[in-house]
Amino acid sequence: MNLKELRRYTHSLLCLVVACAAAFSGPSAADDVKVGVVASFSGPYATWGEQFKQAIELFLEQHKDMAGSDKVSVLYRDNGGPNAQRARQLSQELVVRDSVPVLAGLEFTPTSLAVADLVTEAKVPFVIFNAGTSGVVQKSPMFVRTGFTQWSVAVPAAKWAAQQGMKSCVIVAADYGPGLDGIDAYTKGFTEAGGKIAETIKVPLGTNDFSSYLERVRAASPQCTFMFMPVGPMSVGFIKSYTERGLSKAGIQLITGAEADERDIASVGDAAVGVVSALHYGPYLDNPANKAFVSAYQAKYGKDVVPGIAAIAAYDGMYVVSQMLKATGGKRDGAKAIEAVKGLKWDSPRGPVMIDPKTRDIVQNIYLRRVEKVDGKLVNKVLATFPAVKDPWLEAHPQ
Amino acid sequence: MAQLATLATLLIDGIALSMVLFLISIGMTVTLGIMRVVNLAHCAFAMVGGYLAFALMDRASLGLLAALPIGVLGTMAIGAVLERTIYRWVYGTSELGQILMTIGLTFVMIAAANLVFGSNLHSLAVPSVLAGSLEAGGVTLSAYRAFLVVVAAVIAGVLWVVMEYTNVGARLRASVDNPRVARAVGINVPRVMAATFAVGCGLAALGGILGTQMLPLEPWYALKHLVLVLMVVAVGGLGSIKGSFLAAFLLGLIDTFGRFWVPALGAFLIYLVVVALLVWRPQGLYGRT
């Protein structure tokens, strides 16, 4: 075999290899639309990622044709908690290496802020599932949010308290960014409705023993206590000792937000009975879309599993993603995708919702609920509904 | 009147916290002051006791009062084994060596706790007899905290009697004051030390198990609350049980009342007080010079 022949062989062999590679990855790769999801699948906040994933998988199963004829697959990337730097890096990889047309996920304000510049520059829409600070959506024209904000639940909670004739309340909040947000929101909502904040108590982050703070609440003898704590050990500990110390019995109504999510009050136990909260979703909401959602969720993941606020954020987030993909035909076109979902209305398990065309934040019902024990289970019963609530902070601070 | 009731409630809360701090610190006071060993892993033994009780309650569904003695004895056994194996080396090294070895041991215990029990916070369920609150003359007391105060007061009393009036106490004091002479009169000093170490671990476990309402269990417990324990030991004076008792009392009350009166400063007040106290008396309230 001379050199010329060898070269010809090599050449044809190479062609064969390339052809094979193309054939194997062929049709599926060409038509596959990949959506990038960055969330915490490990670490102390893994429950968020776990619920996101469950809801996304359920949505994909129910909507096989969501981007026309193309098959949609999801690339999950683990952020392992509130790591801003890592969120940015993972999103960048998904944009550059995997060329995703849409990004979604995240659960914290700092991680959401970290990806703002990136998605603005790359013109890739990011559907934020959860970030509690109102101003987040203003940081990039590519942001859409399907969660809830501290302001959107605290103001209705404060209004409700005033409607019940409560005149004087105390605020107890964890001393960090979102807690201070909560203080502002409760104060504004309650004073505008004619109430008076008797006292504001800031509790250091990581506090386990609330006894002194609760005695201070008792000494102020208010009619209600607005509480904001990071959901988890602090909120559970607070609600428990609030009841144990007899503050509920003394007639001081405890009012919270996301702290009363069904998944979390289970670890509080019976001490949670009677707690009032304002929130956009609960698994026991009485509407057809929610009944269908919860029963499908339980059929897939077990009858003791209840979808929480993380699951609903991802489920509705995926609906937004699907509408974006439909509009762009699965291609990357940030401007077109965002335009397509501005003003988008649909019947979510949480009730009728809309993506506000001005702010790109979700407009939704806020429900005032009270924890009751039904058939041995702790359940939030709806007392009042505030329909189509727009985030009050965004309303007051237009871009 | 309402003012008075609040004060009474706070007083009980403060004393309850003090008692937990005292129970956890006492072992460290003894090892650090008497045996001259810097045992930074001491707080980890409180955690071990807590987790043992947690495991018993969670997996064998025992009540708190049943899990308590098993947890304490188990921790004492673990302490005794570690004393005979690892701490023998620790005794012989320099102070820096002791710090490095015991902090290393702490990290091992933290990692082990994280592996076995996960990173969640746990507090042990209070038995139903002690749940809820007592009401007397307008004063609302947490029944469990009242119970805690009684238990700790009894323990402190027993310790005091043992140290002052029994042969065992006399041997320990002798081993400490002058180990050479103690050995000369036939006291087995290493054995006294080993027993003391194990009892110290057991008391820490007792504090750890009873105190989960105030200091909930988590893998970082061993380092997180070590600062408080070190403060009690330093303020009380190395080696002084009386000093530890007084220091725990002082710090527990200041912390509780500080958070009530000046919530904004609450978490820091205790550190300011410790700095002031140590500037005034560098060797602690009852420290030897």
Image (cartoon, rainbow, N blue to C red):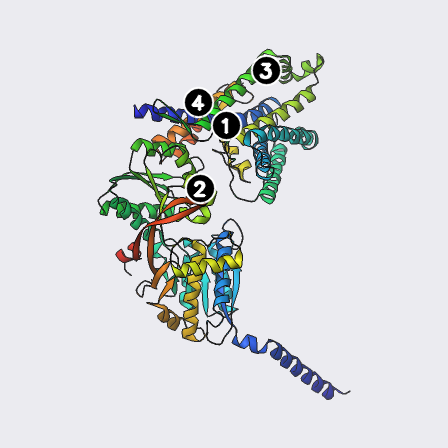
Say few, some or many: other residues with alpha carbon within 10 Å of mark 4 (under 14 / 14 to 19 / 20 or more).
few
Q: Which mark is residue B21?
A: 1
Q: Secondary structure at mark 2?
A: helix
Q: Are marks 2 and 3 in contact (CB under 8 Å)?
A: no
Distance in Å between CA atoms under marks 4 and 2: 41 Å
At label 1, which amino acid type do we have?
A: Leu
In screen coordinates, is B286 left or right of A359? Answer: right
Q: Which residue is mark 2?
A: A236
Q: Characterize the local packing of mark 1: few (<14), some (14-19) or many (20 or more) Cα atoms within 10 angstroms.
A: many
Asked if residue B208 is positioned above or below residue A257 in the image, the reply reads above
Q: Are marks 3 and 1 on the same chain?
A: yes
Please determine if labels 4 and 2 lie on a single subunit: no
Mark number, residue B162: 3
Relative horizontal placement of residue A33, taking residue B113 as reference (left or right): left
Q: Does the residue at mark 2 contact the one at mark 1 (Cβ under 8 Å)? A: no
Disc 2 from disc 1: Cα separation: 23 Å
Q: Dot 4 lies on which element? A: helix
Q: Chain of mark 1?
A: B
> Which image quarter is the N terminus of chain B in?
top left
**Residue hosting label 4:** B280
Which of A169 and A36 lies nearest the eye of the viewer?
A169
Q: CA distance from mark 2 to mark 3?
A: 41 Å
* Same chain check for tags 2 and 3: no
Q: Earlier in the sequence, mark 1 or mark 4?
A: 1
Q: Is residue B267 visible?
A: no
**What whole-number distance in Å separates the C-alpha atoms at marks 3 and 1?**
20 Å
Taking B279 as reference, is A270 above or below it? below
Q: Earlier in the sequence, mark 3 or mark 1?
A: 1
In the orientation shown, which residue stands out farthest toward the front? A375
